[in-house]
Image: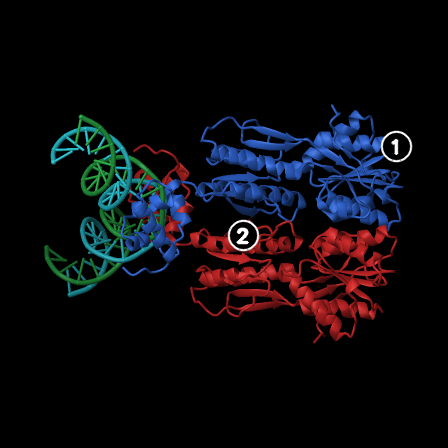
Chain colours: A red, B blue, C green, D cyan
Amino acid sequence: MAARGSPTITTIAEAAGVSIASVSRVLNGLPVRAETERRVLDAAGRLGYVPNSVARSLRSARTHQIAFAVEDIGNPVYLAMLREIQPLLKAAGYRLVLHSTGADTAEEVEVLRGLGQRYADGLIIVPIRVTDEHVAELRAVEAPVVVIGSLPGDGLADNVRTDSRRGVDMALRHLAELGRRRIGFINGPADTVPGGARSEAFRAGTARAGLTVEDGALHEGRFDRETGAEGVRRMAEGPAPMPDALLCANDLIALGALDALRARGLDVPGDVAVVGMDDTDLAAVSWPPLTSVSLGSAERGRHAARLLLDRLDSGAAPSAPRVVTVEPRLVVRASTGGARVVDNGSAAG
Amino acid sequence: MAARGSPTITTIAEAAGVSIASVSRVLNGLPVRAETERRVLDAAGRLGYVPNSVARSLRSARTHQIAFAVEDIGNPVYLAMLREIQPLLKAAGYRLVLHSTGADTAEEVEVLRGLGQRYADGLIIVPIRVTDEHVAELRAVEAPVVVIGSLPGDGLADNVRTDSRRGVDMALRHLAELGRRRIGFINGPADTVPGGARSEAFRAGTARAGLTVEDGALHEGRFDRETGAEGVRRMAEGPAPMPDALLCANDLIALGALDALRARGLDVPGDVAVVGMDDTDLAAVSWPPLTSVSLGSAERGRHAARLLLDRLDSGAAPSAPRVVTVEPRLVVRASTGGARVVDNGSAAG
DNA sequence: TCAATCACCGTAAACGTTTACAGAAATTCA
DNA sequence: TGAATTTCTGTAAACGTTTACGGTGATTGA
């Protein structure tokens, strides 16, 4: 048969005058006679043979692909994770399949279910919500999954979390030290994983610090700039006195707040101190530079990748799911005062 | 045989009391008797059957995956492309495999070569340099490839370009209208695709406008913030008078320049007007907001995805490679004056 | 020199699909 | 009712690998 299309192991075998088994052995470094090896390598080189990864995957039940699923890869938090995950996977010989699921919870579940097609050996997912369906699929799925963001029940899957409560406390303590007492809070949707955690953390933190927070100093919207601006507008135009500090549930919200404050002629940090969360690249770029609670996005990504690779590579020992918690840090910039100190929070309870 | 592991088409066939061919037919919507369909769907549902995509790919020689390769996905330009590409691919039923190659040219070539493994049906690549090896691989590769960024020879591959020269001209014209005459230029590496194009465009544009550019008003470094700051430092400390306008080869450089100008007490745009390139999200966030030449990153991504999907889906007609050129736009913000006008350049020659 | 051992190699089966082909069953028509 | 036609179904081959198994030829030891 004349060689049509790309050469396969069969083409090489014919060209080298050996069997396909010998070709495979040479290609996989199994012991063969020197002469055989020479002829196979020669033929393979001459014909430009490249092994077909699909056939390999079918035979070996390993795709050497790992999926990473987030709501929106444009979000700097997920991007920071991706930037850590990608090189680790590459170094371990895995390709990365990227899913941007969008805000629709059903799509996340769809990704989980899609793993059944076995196009990937494992999955790292950052769910925006965790529904019963998520839980059911997590139980059912066979491939290893690492979830970033707190999971409800124990033992569902490997889990990388962050300590939102601790992070919020660090921000509140910092503001308290600056003498701020009227703290406002602008949040994204409270029914999401991060929105819920941060709202709860704010409630708990202010309560513990003995601060009373008026209703007018709370605003809930989305995790975007408009929400930050809208929150400031409501607070400024409402009956209550303007807060002297704002905690924003992410940096985008904080940027929107900065814009709106500037537009109203309010000085930051003079009139209002502003703290963001996530410490994305934007925080360093904005003006004034934004104090932000780092929730260790990059670190969470790194841990997730490590956990998954561990499960995949070190035998198939189905050990119990592990939980890793990443410590938050407060990165102080000009939006709360001039000091450029990094408080790693190591002394907190 | 008891069903071990996930159910396959064989498991379903046994459970339904039909042949594997019938199962396949039902699953693919080919005509079968109503009774057969019922039994197969029933068994499949009961056992939670999910087709194995690897086996499908092997049989059909279609992976339904498309690779996207860039130097660094953290770069907002590539991110903007990705955000357009991803949903288009998803809608067309393709998964996205992401490669971040790093600055190493050899890795880009490796990605091209890797396509021979047939893990993807096509590739969109944004080369940072185009070497002879790139060209050779592009000729050799069988799967369709779309290159973003100008290719040297014609007909190598589908190609999406931007008109850097035109974009630079728009910026220069804008600065000229503001009365600026001493234009400085801070570039990234001139031996990269974008660096080369932008350097060339600046040379041509200033020549055409009859502007003389002194050596001291040129700086070349990397495409990062430090380079912007360093460029400003050199110009300010050099013997020549400080330029009254700076064109920066991307927004990151421009942000670094803004920082350095502020640090030296120079007013933007009063003393120095600053223009960035790429019009990334950062431009809108910075202070002052940055006038920037949009090179249509999102649009380029969209075109690339369309070209590729076209080739993949509309028959295997191996038509001649196509070239799409995206028009630049100047987005005017405060860093060159207060006006908030978008000049879409439709009147330019 | 002959048997026992060893190194290497080829045949064939398997991974989970899709599909060509031929045969069986159902339907149509006279 | 019987033949001709149509519709449906099952068997087997194929996609490109890896690998168990058995066989061949060379090498060793007496």
Say which chain tag 2 marks. A
Q: Which mark is residue B12?
A: none
The residue positioned 42% from the left and 42% from the top of the image is A50
Taking depth in this image into account, of B71 and B242 the one nearest to the observer is: B71
Taking depth in this image into account, of B242 and C28 the one nearest to the observer is: C28
Q: Is residue B302 left or right of residue A122?
A: right
Residue beneath disc 1: B179
The residue positioned 74% from the left and 48% from the top of the image is B225
Q: Residues within 10 Å of mark 2 (few under 14, many from 20)?
A: some
User: Residue B111's x, y, as percent?
Assistant: 52, 43
The residue positioned 52% from the left and 60% from the top of the image is A134
Taking depth in this image into account, of A236 and A44 the one nearest to the observer is: A236
| Residue type pointed to by label 1 | Gly
Q: Is residue B18 left or right of residue B142?
A: left
| Residue type pointed to by label 2 | Glu
Check whether the beta carbons of the residues at disc 2 and disc 1 lie within 8 A of each other.
Answer: no
B346 lies above or below A238: above
Q: Which mark is residue A107?
A: 2
Determine whether the residue tagged by mark 2 lies in a helix, strand or loop. helix
Say which chain tag 1 marks. B
Q: How many marks?
A: 2
